[in-house]
Amino acid sequence: MPTRHQRDWIDFLSGFVRTNVARLADMSHAAGKEAMMFLGDQWIGTEPYKDGFDELGLDAVVGSVGDGTTLRMISDITGVKYTEGRFLPYFFPDTFYEGNDPSIEAWDNWRKARRAILRSPVDRMGYGGYLSLAAKFPKFVDAVEHIADEFRDIHERTDGRGAKGELNVAILNSWGKMRSWMAFTVAHALPNKQTYSYYGILEALSGMRVNVRFISFDDVIDRGVDTDIDVIINAGHFNTSFTGGDVWKRPKLPAALRAWVRAGGAFVGVGEPSSIDWQGRFFQLADVLGIDEERYQTLSVDKYFPAVTSRHFITADVPEGATVDFGEPVLNTYPIDEDVTVLRADGGQVQLAVNEYGEGRGVYVSGLPYSASNARLLERVLFYASHRERGYATFSSTNPECEVAHYPSAGWYCVVNNTAAPQSTDVVLPDVGVEHFDIEANGMVWPRGDMNRSIRWASAYRGRSMRLPVWCAMSSILTSSRSSLPRR
């Protein structure tokens, strides 16, 4: 839990580092150069989402892209002229050696990043390392050519704008906006046993058809819940900055959230949300979620375990008899009464449940590592919790391995295959009906919004020559979507 002293240290350190960053930016500008910050495994002192970052005079932020979450960590930064993603693999001997195929990692990295780019695009893309190594692998060079042209095509079709979001989703933790897309992160998308069950939520959201923001407990205590928020998610382990700890003892926080949900809001708790041993409860919003965790204080009290509901809107895409990967188990969770709808309960505890709370709804999930099927499950959770089930099918893919991004102002929508194998899917269109798509491996389809024609990207760009200028800070291949980029 971040203490007042720790927060004061962050403010002090940021002031010191930012003063020097501003000096370096001024020196760069005086020399007729741009000032670009590399957002690496750490960003100590700079804090690109902390108030005042736009005053440093930086022209750009570039960072390494490990997946959709790290892409959004870069692309959502404001106050600079442009953002850039450095894609994988780096042109280093650990990947570019005889017998290896670097194009496999290139395509995997691109598929993860692309679904996030469709929602919030970086302005430029590039690769880093030794060009002499990459030149020895023509299959990899061909993959980069295709990826770079596809990146340009996305920008040309959408004018560099993100797809339409159907819901406004807020991640609630101690940090709020200051650590946007940084919760549960360990060294750029590397797995961690204690966090992967929650990190999957961010990865799913990074390419989902929702608008995402990050809010703090203090935001809710001081100002309540913003009126345009549809769903709030609180996720993580007990007594961490993600779930809040003692902050739940402040009456204004649970009171504000209860009132908001009761009036029609949606609260999704993952893992041990709102957790602190206090006033006879562990989950302080157990009444909203319908679920609490036994802390060995009420073992003599009867527990209610309603029969599991096998057919439900949330689990409609889970094949019959299939298991759901909820990640690391959260032990001893139980329904607080017989009115809770339990959707999954294996091993004596609840993994998935929904609860009506006044005009709103609460949903409990024990954990959700990233996968296409889990991303679909989370999407259905969000639409159900916010009472938006009726609009769910429109511009949605029937195949969880494919996703749809809608650009109404540009007159396009995109159906993207997030796998290395061919996929087929149907998409429901408003006032038109169902459109079927067969999409090649790694492929994208761009139908016009007026449905008069459908263009497959691969055929539109087949045979195009590589147009990539070389940038030599690290012998990187870069591609820019625009010749002149205004400050974001």
Image (spheres, helix red, strand yellow):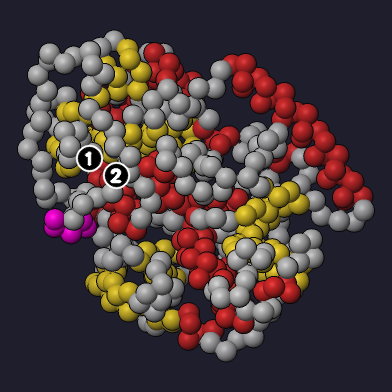
> x, y percentage for residue 214?
49, 37
* Mark 1 Cα-neighbour bin, 10 Å: few <14, some 14–19, many ≥20: many
Give the residue displayed 61% in from the left and 22% down from the top: 7
> x, y percentage for residue 411?
45, 70
Give the residue displayed 11% in from the left and 48% down from the top: 310
| Farthest bottom residue in view | 463
Query: Vertical placement of 475 versus 247: above or below?
Result: below
Left or right, residue 250 beside residue 432: right
Three-letter residue code for mark 2: Phe
Give the residue displayed 51% in from the left and 32% down from the top: 176
Tag 1's secondary structure? Answer: strand
Left or right, residue 245 beside residue 180: left
Give the residue displayed 27% in from the left and 71% down from the top: 426
Query: Vertical placement of 254 versus 306: above or below?
Result: above
Does residue 453 show up magenta in the picture? no
The stretch in magenta equals: 317-321
Residues tagged 1 and 2 counted as in contact (Cβ below 8 A): yes
| Farthest front residue in view | 98
* Residue position marked by numbered label 1 in the rendering: 352
